Image (tube, rainbow, N blue to C red):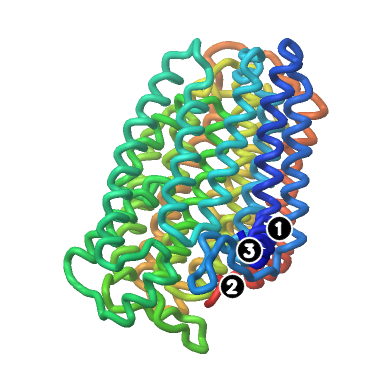
Amino acid sequence: MNTYNLNYLVNSLYLIKPELAISITLVLLVLVDLIMDKDKRLLPYISIAGLVAAGYFIIAQFSTNAFAFSTTNTAGMIIIDPFGNFFKLLIVLSSVAVVLFSMLSGEINEGKERHGEYYTLIFGMILGMMFMISASDLIVVYLSLELLSLSSYVLAGFTKNSLRNSEASLKYLIYGATSSGIMLFGISILYGLTGSTNIYEINSLIQAANVHGFVFVLSGLLIFVGMGYKISAAPFHFWTPDVYEGAPIPITAYLSIASKAAGFALLIRFIKVTFIQSIDPNGFWHLLDVIDWKSFLVIISILTMTLGNFAALWQNNMKRLLAYSSIAHAGYLLLGLAVLSNEGLAAIMIYFMVYAIMNLGAFLVVMLIANKTGSEELDDYKGIGSAAPFLSVSLAILLVSLTGLPPTAGFIGKLYIFIALVDAKMIGVAVIALLNTVVSLYYYARVLKHMFLDKSEKELPAISSSYAAIVFVMVFVAPVLIFGVYFSPLVELAKSSVTLLGF
């Protein structure tokens, strides 16, 4: 290896410091688990320290634009840019929240002897998601997707003494293996047509060779299947309600935020980089005329939000209700992508920041109530407003935000999606999204009715929360209220992060 190649390798490793921090933490978790066989108390603190280190490196290189692991004449396999760093930071913050969730979770604490495997697998997911977000080569995309998936399959069935956990893990594995196989087939077709797996090179080859035809469209749609599965887009959403209901609540919350964020980042990068032709002064993307992504994404987003909202109307389990809610939110997010503009991309980022806060908060309250009552069924929420006033009011605020009503942050997230749709003259689609929001109001209000208006058939004892739990809940409730009024920091961060390397 000559000096130039050695220096380039060192520089590439320097660019992936966040991923290296996660990898080192993963190895450290394994070693500590082996050395301290009976005492698992240090594992969550090591996990948080590793995430803080990774977050520091992400912030330090937030404005960096560079390729890593490339030869002199090709684009790199890994991209470091503000767009990727935004989603990495979102995943790190979500991961810190989930580690703290796990420390408070009755389900996770029942299996203390397996905490080493638990935290190691979470870091396997984090590593897979980070490389997914930064990948510019379809082989790296597939490998990182598999690393994420294999870790999450096991975590979905972490509670071995629960039949529904085992069922969730098996269903997740079957659906995941099928979708990744379909995606790999699409990648192989695209490689056969272009001779490359690098999305920057594929873009250049498409423009130079004027590649068209049914086979090319088929390859793009097959690749979308793997990404659509990760973001719970219809009709690839079938795994979501069963897995969300069966998995431990911290893992359900994690899948609803971090896994979805990584999937969206991958989908946005794939469409924008592979098929971009130009970006006009107004920030609208002009894609190559090979696949009508705009029409396809509009159809998928409408189908996703409508199916998610209407299916949620009939749910009597809080985790299943929030699962269908997350499917509906994926539909709203896809609308931001369907606009095909930088403003739509900024709207997605604003929505994701808000969605992460309110959805994690909702799952936290559901977990704390389940710890006390042993149930996630909606019927058992009757009268809980008087038994657990703090948790009930907190959940009410978070559900109002998930609906998208002012003065909560959820309203701001949806507002920017609607602004992007109106600017793109997609008024009809905006009306459909607005009607879906009205539908979502019904099933969220149904939860509020059970908590505050219905009487429990049995007398409920007062449910108290620890000071740690109260503070943790307020960490999510307070931003929902603050960003509903003062949201300019969210908007500025999103608009500064829409830059993808080269575009």
Residue 212: quadrant of the picture: bottom left
Q: Residue at x 55, y 32 (%)?
A: 251
Look at mark 1 in the image and give the residue it sits on: 14
C-alpha distance separating marks 1 and 2: 21 Å
Residue 370 in the image, given as x and y percentages of width and height: 59, 21
The amino acid type found where label 3 is placed reads Asn
| Viewer-nearest residue: 191 or 329 | 191
Look at mark 2 in the image and give the residue it sits on: 499
C-alpha distance separating marks 3 and 1: 19 Å
The numbered mark at residue 2 is: 3
Note whether residue 18 is visible: yes
Residue 14 position (above or below residue 421): above
Q: Residues within 10 Å of mark 1 (few under 14, many from 20)?
A: few
C-alpha distance separating marks 3 and 2: 34 Å
Q: Secondary structure at mark 3?
A: loop
Residue 44 in the image, given as x and y percentages of width and height: 73, 28
The amino acid type found where label 1 is placed reads Tyr
Q: Residues within 10 Å of mark 2 (few under 14, many from 20)?
A: some
The amino acid type found where label 2 is placed reads Thr
Q: Earlier in the sequence, mark 3 or mark 1?
A: 3
* Residue with the most extreme front position: 2
